[in-house]
Amino acid sequence: MSIVESELETLVDVSGSNELEVLNNNALENEAIYILREVAAQFEKPVLLFSGGKDSITLVRLAQKAFFPAKIPFPLMHIDTGHNFPETIAFRDKLVKELGVELIVRNVQDSIDQGKVVEETGKYSSRNMLQTTTLLDAIEEFKFDACIGGARRDEEKARAKERIFSVRDDFGQWDEKNQRPELFDMLNGQIELGQNVRVFPISNWTELDVWSYIQKENIEIPSIYFAHKRKIFLRDGFIWSAEDDVVFRAEDEKVEERMVRFRTVGDMSCTSAVLSHADTIEKVVGEIRESKISERGARIDDKRSEAAMEKRKQQGYF
Amino acid sequence: MSWHLLKLSAESQCQIQNTKEMEVLKIATAGSVDDGKSTLIGRLLYDTKSLTDDKLEAIEKTSKQKGYDYLDFSLATDGLVAEREQGITIDVAHIYYSTPNKSYIIADTPGHVEYTRNMVTGASTSQAAIILIDARKGVIEQTNRHFFINNLLRIKDVIVAINKMDLVDYSEERYNEIKADFEELMSKRDYQDQKITFIPVSALKGDNVVNRSEKMAWYKGQTLLEHFEELDRKDIFNVGTPRFPVQYVIRPKTEEYHDFRGFAGKVYGGELSVGDEVVVLPSMTKSKIKEIYFYDKKYKTATRRSSVTITLEDEINVSRGDMLVKAGDLPTIDKQFTATVSWMDSQNLTVGSKYVVQHGVNKVLAKVENIHHKINPDYSGIDTSINALGMNDIAQVTFRLNKPIFYDSFKNHRTNGSFILIDNQSNTTAGVGFIN
C-alpha cells in the first residue's frame, strides 16, 4: 500500500467511540480470517489442531479476530506425543483457560498401549510419525469434518503443493495428484460422509510473516522460543536437549551448557535447538530475518529422505 | 561441525523498527517445458538471497548427483516425487520470497497443453504474470495459450520474459523479432488494457532478472525484479463498486453483546463506511451501516479486501450467501446467465447436466441450458459444432439457476463476476466461469 493510500484509510471519529486507528490492511491476515469463517460456515464439526507451537498460537489469535465478539466456535485439539516440552504444555493450559474454549487432548501413549502403533527404538527414535494414528482415531471418534492446522507452504516442498481446503479420504490419505483446483477466493468444502478436510489458513505466510505478526500483535508464546541456558549435547550437527529424558543420548555424547533457543517446538525427540542470544521477540524477528538456515532445517524428521514429508502426508500426517 | 555453524545468523543485533504492513504481490508464471521457468524462479530466489544455506546445499548436492555442471534450481520448486522423477511440474506450487519492500508469492504453474486448468487456477489468485519465451524458439503455440489465459483472467500486469538470451548471443535483433511477433498476438486480445512489458533475460546466467545485464547494454528497461518492486496497488487492482457477501452471522449471545448481530465477510471492489445506505440482497431490504468491526475495534471505513464484521441500523434477516451492496449500485439479479467456462474435470460437461454454482460464498443449483461454442485458447478461432466440454476446454455456456444470484460481469468485477462449478456426485470443483 502506498503511503498516500494508508493516510486515506485513517479513521475518522466513530460517534461515541475513541477508536481512531487505521484499519489494518494485512492481506495475509484478512485471508486467514476469511478462511476461518468459511470453515465455521461450511462444516458441522470443525476442530483446531493445536500443538502449542507458534503457528497454532497464531491461528488461535486469528480465530479470535474472525469471530469477535463471539467465542471461537470450535474446540482445540492437541495430539500429545508425551514428548512435549513441559513449557509448551503449561502454556497450552493457560491459554485455553483464558480463551474459555474446549480443549481435547488425545495421547500417542494410548495408541501405543492399545497396540495400534509400535514405539520406535534407537538413536533416532521419535514419536512424530506415531501421531498420525492417534490423530486419525480422534477424527473418527469425534466425527470431525474439518481440521484446521498451522502448516505453511513455505515450510517444505510437498507442502508447497497443498491446498487451503485439502480433502482427505476415510483413511486420512492425501491424494496429491488429484487435488481440487482452488480459484479466486472460493473454497469448496463439499465432502462425502467419512471424508474430512484439512484446512490451512496461514498457507501463504512465511516463517518471518508469523514472527512479525507475533511481534506486532504482542502475542505470548512459550519460553523455549527465546534464548535460555540449557544443558545440551551435539550429534550429527544438531543441538539436542540433554534436560529431557525422552531424547536419547549415548554415554559418550558430552553434555554442555549453552545459550540456545528452539525455532520450532515439535516432538522433543526430533526438534533440535539453535545457538542464540535472542531473548526478546524483537531479537528473534531480527534473527529470522537474517537467517541462513531454513526452519525445518532443525527438524530431523524431514531429513529421513528427500520425500519424507510427501510420504507422511499421504499416510495422513498433518 | 563447529559450533558457529549452529547459529541461524551472525550475532544479530538488528532490531526491527520497520513494522509497516508488507505489501503482498502474487505472480503467476507460465512457460512451456524447458523454457527455463524453474531456473528463472531459482534465479530470483538466489539473487535476492532468499535461498537458505541448507536448501542451496541440497540443490548443489542433487545437481552434482545428476551430473550437471550448473545448479538445477528446479529442484527447489518441484515438490512431488513424480515431478522430480519425470523432471516436470505437475501441480501449482507456491514459492515465497521477499525484499525489504514487498512480499512475493510465485504461483509456479506447469505449462503443458493438458494443464490449462492449473494455469487458470494459478492466474485466478495472481495480480501479475510472467510469460516465458525461449529466445531460440520465439512465439510458439503454447505462448498463445499462456497469453490467452492471462488475458481471459484479466491479469492487469504481464511481463513477457524472453529467456535464454545467452543462447542467441544476446541479440537485440532476435529480441525485437520476438517482440514484434508477440505484439501481433496482442492485437487479438479481448482485454486491451492489460499492461505488457518485454524483458530480455538469461535466467541461467542471471541477466536482467535481479541484476542488470552487462551483455545487453542495448536494453534500457527495468529488470524483472525492478519492475515488480515498482508496481503500485493501482497497477494491479481494479477499483469498482463495493460488494459484501455475507459469510457468517456472528451472534455472541453473551450479556455484554446480548443483541449483537454482526455480518462477517470480506469487502470486494470498493469501500464501505459507517452511515452508508445499503440494500440487502436478495430481500431488497434497505438499512444503514451502523458499525464496522475489525476484531475488537470499530472503524469508520472498511477498506477493499478487509475481513470485517458489519452491523446494521435495523433488525433485518440476513444470512450466509446474502449480499450487502450500496443503495443505487445494484448488481444484476437474475436466474440465468452466460459465461466463459474453463472446464477442469475428466467428466464432460453436457447440455442438461446439473451442477452446484458457487458464486463467492453463495451456492445455487444450476442446469446447463446451452453450450454456444468452444473457444480455442490459442487464438485459432471458435468451434460451434461441440455439444460437450472436456477437460481443459474453454467455452461459452448458458446456465439456468433454481434461485437468482446477484452478479456483475467479470470484466467489471473480478470477484462478483466469477463462480465455480461443483459436481454434486464427486463434490469436486469441476470448472470455473467468468460471467459475460
Image: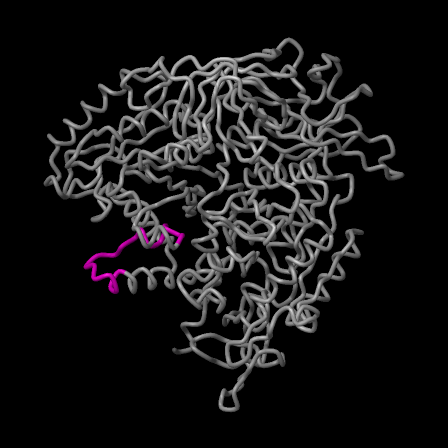
Residue placed farthest to the right in the image? B255
Q: Quadrant of the C terminus of chain A?
A: bottom right
In the foreground, B431 or B125:
B431
Residue A218 shown left or right of residue B123 in the figure: right
| Residue visible at 64% across and 68% down in the picture | A116
How many marks overall?
A: 0
Residue A47 shown left or right of residue B31 in the figure: right
**Percent coordinates x, y for residue A181 in the rendering:** 48, 37
**Percent coordinates x, y for residue A260 in the rendering:** 54, 72
Residue A251 shown left or right of residue B265 in the figure: left
Q: Which residues are magenta?
A: B63-80
Position above or below: A168 against A34: below
Position above or below: A51 against B282: below
Report the predominant secondary structure element of the magenta stretch: loop
| Residue visible at 69% across and 71% down in the picture | A114
Residue placed farthest to the bottom in the image? A251
In the foreground, A11 or B54:
B54
Position above or below: B155 against A141: above
Q: How is the image coloured?
A: one colour
| Residue visible at 74% across and 31% down in the picture | B249
| Residue visible at 57% across and 12% down in the picture | B336
**Percent coordinates x, y for residue B53 in the rendering:** 37, 62
**Percent coordinates x, y for residue B238 in the rendering:** 47, 22
Position above or below: B139 against A286: above
> Residue A109 magenta-drawn?
no
